[in-house]
Every structure is written in structure tokens, then in C-alpha cells.
Image (cartoon, helix red, strand yellow):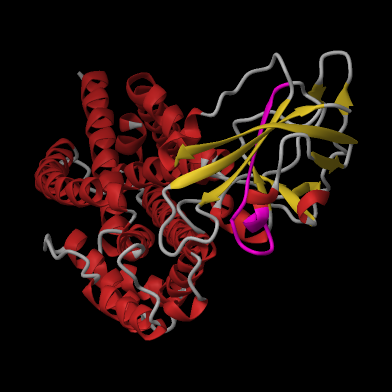
Amino acid sequence: MHNNKLVQALKATISSIIVAFFITSALMLVIYLFCGQEIEEIFSLVSKVSIDINPEREQEPIEIDTDDNTLVNYPEYGTQYATIKIDKIDLEAPVYYGDTLEILKKGVGHSSGSYFPGEGGSIIYMGHNSKKMFRRFSELQIGNEIKVTTTYGEYTYKIYDMQLIKETEVDKLPIQKEKEILMVYTCYPFNNIGYATQRYVVYAELVK
Amino acid sequence: MKVLINIIKIIIIAILTICILFLGIRNIFSSTILDQSYITSKLEETNLYHETYELVKSNFENYIYQSGLDEIVLEDICTEEKVKNDLNTILSNIYQGTDVKIDTTEIVDNLNKNIDELDIKTSSNAKAIDQFVQHICDEYTDTILHTKYETSINEMYSKAVDLLEKINKIVLIVALVSAILLIILNIKNISKLIQNLGTALLASSVFVLVAHNIVTTKVYVEDIKVFNDAFSNTLVTILKDVLQKIQSFGIVTLVIAIVLIIVYAIIVFCKPANAKHIAEEE
């Protein structure tokens, strides 16, 4: 008698669980069928703004593949990967991958849309026209050298042109992969008071 | 006939499950991201006012490097109190539908006063200095407001609240009708209502816990970065809190469901007179 009642009680419990799981599965299936793609898109969007900033993770060594002139491991955004040296104006400054205002406070920024030294394309660097950085850019002349020492090699560029462009034209600096060109720009006028609406661009080609 | 009744019961339980899910999640959202006082408390907790003030000052300094002006011009042009008031104004714009613009007159006045004290403004650089002042103001509003998102967030909030209110009314009516239907269907054995309710709660809790697990596995909430560190920190804290509340809701619902299912099992076990009848029903 007791066993019979126990079986009935168990049956009632199990039937509840089965129905509950059936309803949950059905609900999930319906949601997946009707909004699965949208949900995936939301996950993907949130993942894009989810930046892994694990300080314990070590940066893979940056190397250059000489066969196709591309870096094997790219530096992490915001990290220093090179030093720029211009003897003519006694400048030696760190180069960081990225071009945020925070990065420009620390040194020279590398535009993330441009190539890296050694990759054979356009490299775009930028920096403030402060005394520590590019205030003396006006003293540069065609033929002066710019040395970039990266963690994977040393590159020397020779200045072949200087140009003034509008602040809004910075995004139009030519990005190509036919010839290695280093473009370094800063705000102009160098000793201006107020907001600088022009940029002074120095063009240099790879010599070594 | 019995099969048909059972199918109808399952459908009603499924509808009740959706109602429980909606009411639970809606309640969590109403007491968190849709509640201005909750958001204000989180801003205080994560020190957003101070962090934003520091960020504003730091962003101003970036313009100093290229302006050729001495850093002294930025001294005391903006206070932490102003940042706090402006952030609260933005919150009121979102939650109360007000349309108060961020006023930068104080910053302009203080900046011009500092520039005048340096006595560097001439007719040749006046325009550039005015542009510099304007950029400082723009930088301030951008840092505080993230201008381009304000309108869309304001619209989104009022639309979401309107929609939630409408759906809430419908869900309450549907839940009530479902409960009445379940009572009618279980009129011969009213204790089965406990089992049905337990099943609906169990389905809701399993759904919530599985969904919570999927979200936390697919999204690294801790690493979310939006606009700046101060804002991201607050956003992450709020998201984690919401997820925590959703998980708690799932666990509480699960416990209630288990209790109800066990209570019904005990009723079945202890009802000798109805045992046969219940067995037949099962």
C-alpha cells in the first residue's frame, strides 16, 4: 500500500519535472528560432567591447616574417613597441601602438590603421608639438634621418618632403603597401597660442 | 478527453511560465537600470563623479600641449561639484524626460579669466584662443555626455518604459486568466494546482538559470570597455548586479518550485482516500 503511494508520489514529481523541462526547452527553441540571430548579434556586439586586459598575460614576441613582410605578432594596443630618434632635433621618444589622447600624453602614437616598420607600407606616427616632442619640427630638412628602433629590428628613414595639411585631412594621408613611407605629423603652427587647425607632416622613405 | 485536458494544462502552465519570467525580469529591471535612484547610488558607489572629474581634467590637458598656453589656464575652470551636477542632469534627462542642456558658461568664464590674467590675447591670436576655449567646452560635454548617444538613450528609455508598462498589464491579465483556467481544470482535485504552479515555477527557474549561464559564458562582463574606464567600471558593476539579481531570482524560484512539488508529492502520499483517483489522474 505504502509502496503504491510512494510510486504515485514519485510519478507526480517526475511528471512535474518532465513537463517543466519540456516547457523550458520549447521556450528556448522558440526564442532561438525567432530571435536567435538577433541574440547572437547582441552577444557579438558586447564581445567587441569586452577587452581582455589580463595584466598577467605576456605579450608574444613581435617578429617580422621576411617572406611576406608582415608581423608575426602585433603589439598590444597602447603598448610601447619602438623608439623614434631624430638626431637633427635631439629627439628620442617612445612609440606606442595606438593614437588615443592618453597615448599621445606618453609619447608618439602609431595610427592603428597604418602599417608597421618593415611591412613595406605607409606608417603614420603622430605626436604633440610640445617641447618634449615635435616642437622643433621646423628645423628638419630634406635628407635628415629618422631612426625607428623596434623590438624586432632597426629602420632608418630619410626625409624627402614636408607638407602642411588641414586638421581634417589627416584621415586622408595615403595608406599603401607599395613603398615603405614613414609619415610623422604634429600640430601647426609650432608656437601657436590657441587651437591648432593645421598639421605639419614629415614624409620619409626607408633607406635601411 | 483526459489527454486533451492534459495538453491544455501544459499550454496554460507554459503561458504561466512566460508570465512568471516576464514579471520577475521586469521587476529586476524596474528596481535596477530603470530606477534613477539605483543608478545614482551606483554612480556614488563606483566613484564615477570623481573619476569623470579626473578624466575631464586629463582630457583638458591634452589640448594644452598643442595650444602653446601655460597649464595655469586650466586651473579651477571646472569643479567636481559641476561634474556631479551635470551627470545628475543627464540622468534626469533620461529618467524624468527633462531636456536640460549642459551649461558650459562657467567653464568659458573661468577659462577666459585665466587667459586674461596671462595677458597673451592679441588681435592675431584671438580667434585661435576662442577656438581653443570652444574645444575645451566641446571636450567637456563630450566627456560628460557622449553627445551622440544622449538622444537615442533618452528615446530608448521612454519607449522601453512605455512598452514594459503595456506588456505588464497584458501579462497580469493573462496570468490571472491562466490561474483561473487552472483552477477550473483542477476543480475535482484542487491540490493539483500546487503541482501545476510548482511546474510553472520550475520551468521559469530552469529557463532563467540556463539563460544566465549562457550570458555569463558568452559575455565577459568584467572586461567590458565603453567610452572610458570610469564609465566602464560603473556599467560593469550595474551589469554584474543585474545578472546577480537574475540568478537569485532563478534560485529563489527553483526553491519555491521544489517545495511546491514536494508538498504535492506529500499530499499524494498522505491522501489514502484519493490515492486511486490521483493515480488515475496521473
Q: Toward the viewer: B86 or B125?
A: B125
Q: Toward the viewer: A172 or B240?
A: A172
User: Relative to A106, is B150 on the left or the right?
Assistant: left
Q: Toward the viewer: B62 or A18?
A: B62
Q: Is residue B272 above or below residue B282?
A: below
Any part of residue A13 in sight: no
- Please state the horizontal and vertical placement of residue A66, each as a whole percent of the image: 89, 19
Report if residue A133 lies within the magenta region: yes
Any part of residue A110 in sight: yes
- Please state the horizontal and vertical placement of residue B12, each as a whole percent of the image: 22, 33
Q: Quadrant of the C terminus of chain A?
A: top right
Q: Quadrant of residue A144?
A: top right
Q: Quadrant of residue B44?
A: bottom left
Question: What are the residue bounds of the magenta stretch?
Answer: A121-136
Residue at 36%, 48% (x, y): give it.
B272
Q: Is residue B27 above or below residue A41?
A: below
- Please state the horizontal and vertical placement of residue A185, each as a whole percent of the image: 60, 43
Residue at 28%, 33% (x, y): give it.
B14
- Please state the horizontal and vertical placement of residue B2, each as a whole percent of the image: 24, 22
Residue at 67%, 44% (x, y): give it.
A77
Q: Is residue A26 above or below residue A128?
A: above
